[in-house]
Image (tube, grey):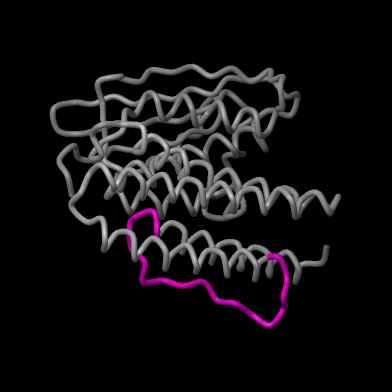
Amino acid sequence: MNPNEVKYIQERTNAILDVIMAYARLDFTQKTEITDQGDVFDSIASGVNMLGEELENSVITLQEREALLQEVHHRVKNNLQIISSLMNLQASYTKDEKFLALIRECRNRIISMSMIHEMLYRTKDLSRIQVSDYISTLTLSINSSFSGSRSDVVFEYDIDDRIYLEADRMIPIGLIINEAVSNSFKYAFPDGKGIIRIIFTSSKTHFRMKISDNGIGLPTTIQTEAFESLGIQLISALSDQLSAELKILRENGLGYELRFKIESR
Protein backbone atom coordinates (compact mmCIF):
# COMPACT_ATOMS: atom_id res chain seq x y z
CA MET A 1 0.00 0.00 0.00
CA ASN A 2 1.54 3.29 -1.12
CA PRO A 3 1.49 6.51 0.99
CA ASN A 4 -1.32 8.04 -1.07
CA GLU A 5 -3.55 5.03 -0.43
CA VAL A 6 -2.82 5.15 3.30
CA LYS A 7 -3.58 8.89 3.36
CA TYR A 8 -6.85 8.30 1.49
CA ILE A 9 -7.94 5.59 3.93
CA GLN A 10 -7.08 7.75 6.95
CA GLU A 11 -8.91 10.79 5.59
CA ARG A 12 -12.06 8.86 4.63
CA THR A 13 -12.07 6.97 7.94
CA ASN A 14 -11.62 10.10 10.05
CA ALA A 15 -14.36 11.93 8.10
CA ILE A 16 -16.81 9.09 8.72
CA LEU A 17 -15.87 8.88 12.42
CA ASP A 18 -16.38 12.64 12.83
CA VAL A 19 -19.95 12.31 11.57
CA ILE A 20 -20.64 9.26 13.76
CA MET A 21 -19.37 11.19 16.81
CA ALA A 22 -21.74 14.03 15.92
CA TYR A 23 -24.65 11.57 15.77
CA ALA A 24 -23.63 10.19 19.17
CA ARG A 25 -24.07 13.75 20.51
CA LEU A 26 -27.51 13.83 18.79
CA ASP A 27 -26.23 16.37 16.24
CA PHE A 28 -27.53 15.24 12.87
CA THR A 29 -26.55 18.29 10.80
CA GLN A 30 -23.34 16.71 9.49
CA LYS A 31 -23.18 14.43 6.45
CA THR A 32 -20.41 12.22 5.10
CA GLU A 33 -19.15 12.93 1.59
CA ILE A 34 -19.88 10.28 -1.04
CA THR A 35 -17.32 10.30 -3.85
CA ASP A 36 -17.36 8.76 -7.33
CA GLN A 37 -14.93 6.01 -6.25
CA GLY A 38 -17.69 3.53 -5.48
CA ASP A 39 -15.55 1.80 -2.87
CA VAL A 40 -16.36 0.40 0.58
CA PHE A 41 -15.99 3.85 2.14
CA ASP A 42 -18.72 5.22 -0.12
CA SER A 43 -20.96 2.33 0.93
CA ILE A 44 -20.28 3.03 4.61
CA ALA A 45 -20.75 6.79 4.07
CA SER A 46 -24.13 6.20 2.42
CA GLY A 47 -25.22 4.03 5.34
CA VAL A 48 -24.01 6.63 7.87
CA ASN A 49 -25.97 9.40 6.13
CA MET A 50 -29.12 7.25 6.06
CA LEU A 51 -28.60 6.52 9.77
CA GLY A 52 -28.44 10.26 10.49
CA GLU A 53 -31.73 10.92 8.69
CA GLU A 54 -33.44 8.05 10.50
CA LEU A 55 -32.18 9.15 13.91
CA GLU A 56 -33.07 12.80 13.31
CA ASN A 57 -36.65 11.84 12.56
CA SER A 58 -36.72 9.54 15.58
CA VAL A 59 -35.43 12.21 17.96
CA ILE A 60 -37.98 14.74 16.73
CA THR A 61 -40.79 12.22 17.19
CA LEU A 62 -39.62 10.79 20.51
CA GLN A 63 -38.41 14.00 22.17
CA GLU A 64 -38.90 14.24 25.96
CA ARG A 65 -40.10 10.63 26.20
CA GLU A 66 -37.52 8.59 28.11
CA ALA A 67 -38.92 5.16 27.44
CA LEU A 68 -38.76 5.72 23.69
CA LEU A 69 -35.42 7.53 23.85
CA GLN A 70 -34.00 4.22 24.98
CA GLU A 71 -35.05 2.83 21.61
CA VAL A 72 -33.11 5.63 19.90
CA HIS A 73 -29.95 4.62 21.78
CA HIS A 74 -30.65 1.01 20.83
CA ARG A 75 -30.84 1.98 17.15
CA VAL A 76 -27.61 3.96 17.35
CA LYS A 77 -25.85 1.00 18.95
CA ASN A 78 -27.16 -1.44 16.34
CA ASN A 79 -26.17 0.75 13.42
CA LEU A 80 -22.70 1.35 14.84
CA GLN A 81 -22.31 -2.41 15.11
CA ILE A 82 -23.36 -2.78 11.47
CA ILE A 83 -20.68 -0.29 10.43
CA SER A 84 -18.15 -2.21 12.51
CA SER A 85 -19.20 -5.44 10.75
CA LEU A 86 -18.76 -3.79 7.35
CA MET A 87 -15.22 -2.86 8.32
CA ASN A 88 -14.55 -6.44 9.43
CA LEU A 89 -15.87 -7.68 6.09
CA GLN A 90 -13.61 -5.33 4.16
CA ALA A 91 -10.64 -6.41 6.28
CA SER A 92 -11.24 -10.05 5.35
CA TYR A 93 -10.38 -9.26 1.71
CA THR A 94 -6.85 -8.04 2.36
CA LYS A 95 -3.66 -9.11 4.08
CA ASP A 96 -2.12 -5.64 4.06
CA GLU A 97 -1.00 -5.10 7.65
CA LYS A 98 -1.25 -1.29 7.52
CA PHE A 99 -4.79 -1.45 6.20
CA LEU A 100 -5.78 -4.06 8.79
CA ALA A 101 -4.34 -1.90 11.57
CA LEU A 102 -6.34 1.10 10.37
CA ILE A 103 -9.53 -0.97 10.24
CA ARG A 104 -8.93 -2.26 13.78
CA GLU A 105 -8.35 1.27 15.10
CA CYS A 106 -11.55 2.53 13.51
CA ARG A 107 -13.52 -0.47 14.71
CA ASN A 108 -12.34 -0.03 18.29
CA ARG A 109 -13.33 3.65 18.23
CA ILE A 110 -16.77 2.74 16.97
CA ILE A 111 -17.13 0.04 19.63
CA SER A 112 -16.20 2.53 22.38
CA MET A 113 -19.14 4.73 21.31
CA SER A 114 -21.48 1.80 20.70
CA MET A 115 -20.98 0.58 24.29
CA ILE A 116 -22.17 3.92 25.66
CA HIS A 117 -25.44 3.68 23.75
CA GLU A 118 -25.85 0.06 24.81
CA MET A 119 -25.45 1.06 28.48
CA LEU A 120 -27.91 3.94 28.04
CA TYR A 121 -30.37 1.49 26.49
CA ARG A 122 -30.06 -0.83 29.50
CA THR A 123 -30.18 1.80 32.23
CA LYS A 124 -33.21 3.43 33.84
CA ASP A 125 -31.41 6.77 34.11
CA LEU A 126 -30.61 8.09 30.64
CA SER A 127 -28.58 10.98 32.03
CA ARG A 128 -25.62 9.00 33.40
CA ILE A 129 -23.37 5.98 32.95
CA GLN A 130 -21.39 4.11 35.61
CA VAL A 131 -17.75 4.83 34.83
CA SER A 132 -16.28 1.66 36.39
CA ASP A 133 -18.64 -0.64 34.47
CA TYR A 134 -17.97 1.12 31.20
CA ILE A 135 -14.17 1.19 31.52
CA SER A 136 -13.87 -2.47 32.50
CA THR A 137 -16.11 -3.54 29.60
CA LEU A 138 -14.28 -1.33 27.11
CA THR A 139 -10.78 -2.46 28.09
CA LEU A 140 -11.86 -6.10 27.91
CA SER A 141 -13.00 -5.48 24.33
CA ILE A 142 -9.73 -3.74 23.38
CA ASN A 143 -7.71 -6.53 24.98
CA SER A 144 -9.62 -9.10 22.94
CA SER A 145 -9.14 -7.08 19.75
CA PHE A 146 -5.36 -7.09 20.10
CA SER A 147 -4.76 -10.38 21.87
CA GLY A 148 -7.56 -12.73 20.89
CA SER A 149 -8.44 -15.27 23.56
CA ARG A 150 -5.05 -15.06 25.30
CA SER A 151 -3.23 -12.02 26.64
CA ASP A 152 -0.13 -11.47 28.74
CA VAL A 153 -1.09 -7.85 29.36
CA VAL A 154 -2.60 -7.30 32.81
CA PHE A 155 -5.02 -4.50 33.68
CA GLU A 156 -4.98 -2.85 37.10
CA TYR A 157 -7.89 -0.61 38.09
CA ASP A 158 -8.48 2.01 40.74
CA ILE A 159 -11.93 3.31 39.80
CA ASP A 160 -14.53 4.70 42.16
CA ASP A 161 -17.70 2.75 41.36
CA ARG A 162 -19.81 5.62 42.77
CA ILE A 163 -18.89 7.87 39.83
CA TYR A 164 -21.48 8.31 37.09
CA LEU A 165 -21.18 10.62 34.07
CA GLU A 166 -23.46 11.80 31.29
CA ALA A 167 -23.06 10.47 27.74
CA ASP A 168 -21.60 13.64 26.22
CA ARG A 169 -18.60 13.37 28.55
CA MET A 170 -18.33 9.58 28.44
CA ILE A 171 -17.88 9.60 24.65
CA PRO A 172 -14.55 11.54 24.66
CA ILE A 173 -13.46 9.66 27.79
CA GLY A 174 -14.11 6.34 26.07
CA LEU A 175 -12.19 7.43 22.98
CA ILE A 176 -9.26 8.66 25.08
CA ILE A 177 -9.09 5.31 26.88
CA ASN A 178 -9.32 3.49 23.56
CA GLU A 179 -6.42 5.48 22.08
CA ALA A 180 -4.20 5.21 25.15
CA VAL A 181 -4.76 1.49 25.71
CA SER A 182 -4.44 0.71 21.99
CA ASN A 183 -1.13 2.60 21.89
CA SER A 184 0.13 0.54 24.82
CA PHE A 185 -0.71 -2.69 23.02
CA LYS A 186 0.93 -1.51 19.79
CA TYR A 187 4.10 0.09 21.09
CA ALA A 188 4.76 -0.41 24.81
CA PHE A 189 5.35 -4.16 25.10
CA PRO A 190 7.76 -5.63 22.51
CA ASP A 191 7.66 -8.99 24.29
CA GLY A 192 3.86 -8.92 24.60
CA LYS A 193 3.89 -8.69 28.41
CA GLY A 194 3.07 -5.72 30.61
CA ILE A 195 0.73 -3.86 32.88
CA ILE A 196 -1.81 -1.15 32.01
CA ARG A 197 -3.17 0.85 34.94
CA ILE A 198 -6.33 2.94 34.88
CA ILE A 199 -7.29 5.31 37.70
CA PHE A 200 -10.53 7.28 37.85
CA THR A 201 -11.23 9.10 41.11
CA SER A 202 -12.70 12.39 42.29
CA SER A 203 -12.07 15.18 44.75
CA LYS A 204 -14.60 17.79 45.84
CA THR A 205 -14.20 19.78 42.62
CA HIS A 206 -12.46 17.61 39.99
CA PHE A 207 -12.32 14.19 38.40
CA ARG A 208 -8.90 12.62 37.84
CA MET A 209 -8.26 10.00 35.17
CA LYS A 210 -4.88 8.39 34.63
CA ILE A 211 -3.99 5.75 32.04
CA SER A 212 -0.43 4.42 32.12
CA ASP A 213 1.68 1.40 31.23
CA ASN A 214 5.01 0.00 32.39
CA GLY A 215 6.31 -0.43 28.86
CA ILE A 216 9.35 0.91 27.04
CA GLY A 217 8.01 4.48 26.89
CA LEU A 218 9.33 7.19 24.59
CA PRO A 219 12.96 8.32 24.43
CA THR A 220 13.41 11.58 26.36
CA THR A 221 14.99 13.19 23.29
CA ILE A 222 11.79 12.82 21.27
CA GLN A 223 8.99 15.37 21.49
CA THR A 224 5.53 13.83 21.86
CA GLU A 225 4.14 16.32 19.33
CA ALA A 226 5.97 14.39 16.62
CA PHE A 227 4.00 11.21 17.34
CA GLU A 228 0.67 11.95 15.69
CA SER A 229 0.47 8.32 14.54
CA LEU A 230 0.45 7.22 18.18
CA GLY A 231 -2.86 8.97 18.80
CA ILE A 232 -1.41 11.60 21.14
CA GLN A 233 -2.84 14.39 19.01
CA LEU A 234 -6.29 12.82 19.16
CA ILE A 235 -6.04 12.42 22.94
CA SER A 236 -5.14 16.11 23.21
CA ALA A 237 -8.13 17.13 21.07
CA LEU A 238 -10.51 14.96 23.09
CA SER A 239 -9.13 16.42 26.32
CA ASP A 240 -10.06 19.86 25.01
CA GLN A 241 -13.64 18.63 24.57
CA LEU A 242 -13.67 17.83 28.29
CA SER A 243 -12.02 21.16 29.16
CA ALA A 244 -9.47 18.94 30.88
CA GLU A 245 -5.90 19.62 31.92
CA LEU A 246 -3.77 16.97 30.19
CA LYS A 247 -0.34 15.79 31.31
CA ILE A 248 1.75 13.28 29.36
CA LEU A 249 3.74 11.11 31.77
CA ARG A 250 7.03 9.64 30.58
CA GLU A 251 8.47 7.90 33.64
CA ASN A 252 8.52 4.08 33.88
CA GLY A 253 6.53 3.79 30.66
CA LEU A 254 4.04 6.18 29.07
CA GLY A 255 0.89 7.61 30.57
CA TYR A 256 -1.77 10.30 30.37
CA GLU A 257 -3.34 12.14 33.29
CA LEU A 258 -6.45 14.31 32.97
CA ARG A 259 -8.19 16.58 35.47
CA PHE A 260 -11.56 18.12 34.70
CA LYS A 261 -14.30 19.76 36.71
CA ILE A 262 -17.07 17.75 38.28
CA GLU A 263 -19.86 20.18 37.52
CA SER A 264 -21.61 19.87 34.17
CA ARG A 265 -20.35 22.08 31.42
Q: Is residue 29 left or right of residue 90?
A: left
Q: Is residue 216 above or below residue 41?
A: above
Of 174 and 240, the residue lying toward us: 174
Q: Is residue 54 above or below residue 189?
A: below
Q: Which residue is depicted at the point 39% across and 24% down?
A: 133
Q: Residue furthest bottom?
A: 36
Q: Which residue is depicted at the point 41% across and 44% down?
A: 74
> Residue 256: which quarter of the image?
top left
Residue 165 horizontal/vertical position (percent): 26, 36
> Residue 134: which quarter of the image?
top left
Residue 217 horizontal/vertical position (percent): 60, 33
Specify whether residue 30 is painted magenta: yes
Q: Is residue 92 left or right of residue 20?
A: right
Q: Is residue 137 above or below residue 53?
A: above
Of 59 and 153, the residue lying toward us: 59
Of 193 and 142, the residue lying toward us: 142
Region in magenta: 23-40
Q: How many numbered tags mark residues here?
A: 0
Q: Main secondary structure of the magenta part?
A: loop
Q: Quadrant of the N terminus?
A: bottom right
Residue 9 horizontal/vertical position (percent): 68, 64
